[in-house]
Amino acid sequence: MFDGSPQTITASEMPGWTRQPNQPVTYPRMFVASAVELGANHSGILQRAGVSAEILDDPAGRISYLQTLQLFEAVHAAIDDTALGFDTGLRLPLTAHGNLGYALMCAPTPREAISILERFWHLRGRGTLMTVRESETDLFFEIEPEVPIPVPLREMMFSSILTSMIRGMEFVLPMLPNEREIWLCGPEPGGYSSRQLQVPGVRFNMPRAGVVLGGDRSWLDQPLPTANPEGLAQALAQCERESALTEIDNDIARQVRAHLVLGQNGYPAPEQLAANLCLTTRTLRRRLHERGLSYKQLLDDVRRRDSCHLLATSDLEIQSVSELLGFADPANFTRAFKSWTGLAPRMWRRNNSQLRR
């Protein structure tokens, strides 16, 4: 991670996928508009970033992640205030997130909406990784950059993302707990005080960035007032289509997750995964290591997902679920599941029994 003032983004230092036009222009366009309202020169920002006005003004336009970062850098150079991110987050309604936003509105419960957000986050959050962790005390939506970027740009981007997340939650969740905070890793920017009334509950200099929801979590399984089964089916179909169209990059993590499917003999071993991806096992491990990942980490991710699905939608005994997921000892599964969700499998199933079909 870089420190200090924002450096110029160097294309040669960025992975290949960052040059592919898979980013919606919605977010960078909002940043530019907010900067112009504060006195920045629109043409100057675009010229510095090397992005044409025609691309940015196209509602269906897409740019690369590298161009997005260059626009953020140009905006920051013009305004020199990372608190601008809060302004853009406040201006982004849930509908600004396209098919994903509509799917979240149509979901039957907050828990199902969270599952959809995890599944399709990459459609609107490419370049930023999001992980949801549920413990006995809170629910934490953690975000982190997919590639290292200068700290000021990270803080400006993350303050926008997290503010928009809170706004979206407040829109569809009238039962949202009052115990909610935004965590940011950087120091408080000079312009935050003028936005504090609009975006309260922000904590700076935190070890992680994300949204924290505390208190009782019974609201996770209450019906959403905007639930719409027909609309949800249509929105999910569009999300699947959009995902297929954008899945053209060489993202090894996503490729591995796509092939880590639970079968009759459990999950594919690293050797089988490598063969499916036309790689050697050594190359697969190296490419995952380059992304700061491992086979075990990705396996744990899909085990968590699949264990929740099996517990919520089947009558299988806990031991049978444990065996299906490849745990030789049910006690090891219980420990792992509690580390993923904050609850033992039996308690989690009891709390989520209404999700069974």
Image: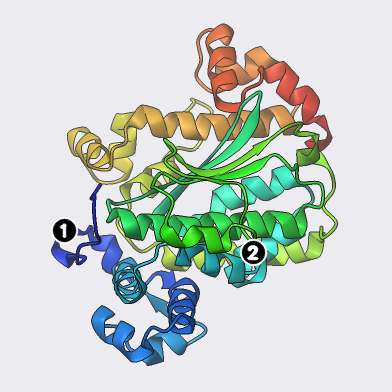
Q: Position of residue 341 (x, y in %)?
A: 61, 27
Dot 1, how many residues are within 10 Å of its Cα: few (below 14), some (14-19), or many (20+)?
Answer: few
User: Looking at the image, which is closer to me, 107 or 76?
Assistant: 76
In the picture shown, does residue 42 fall above or below 235? Answer: below
Provide the secondary structure element on which disc 2 rests.
Answer: helix
Q: Position of residue 4 (x, y in %)?
A: 23, 53
Q: Position of residue 60 (x, y in %)?
A: 50, 82
Instruction: Examine the image and state in which quarter residue 284 appears.
Output: top left
Q: Amino acid at mark 1?
A: Glu
Give the labeled residue for mark 1.
Answer: 13
The residues bearing labels 1 and 2 have C-alpha atoms spaced at a distance of: 32 Å
User: Looking at the image, which is closer to me, 90 or 144?
Assistant: 90
Lateral position of residue 92 relative to residue 130, left or right: right
In the picture shown, does residue 23 fall above or below 180? Answer: below
The colour scheme applied to this rendered structure is rainbow
x 22%, y 41%: residue: 290
x 58%, y 21%: residue: 337
Instruction: Examine the image and state in which quarter residue 297 appears.
Output: top left
User: Looking at the image, which is closer to me, 316 or 186?
Assistant: 186
Number of dots carrying numbers: 2
Give the labeled residue for mark 2.
Answer: 101
Lateral position of residue 350 relative to residue 308, left or right: right
Q: Amino acid at mark 2?
A: Gly
x 47%, y 64%: residue: 85
Q: For residue 152, which numbered disc appears in the image?
A: none
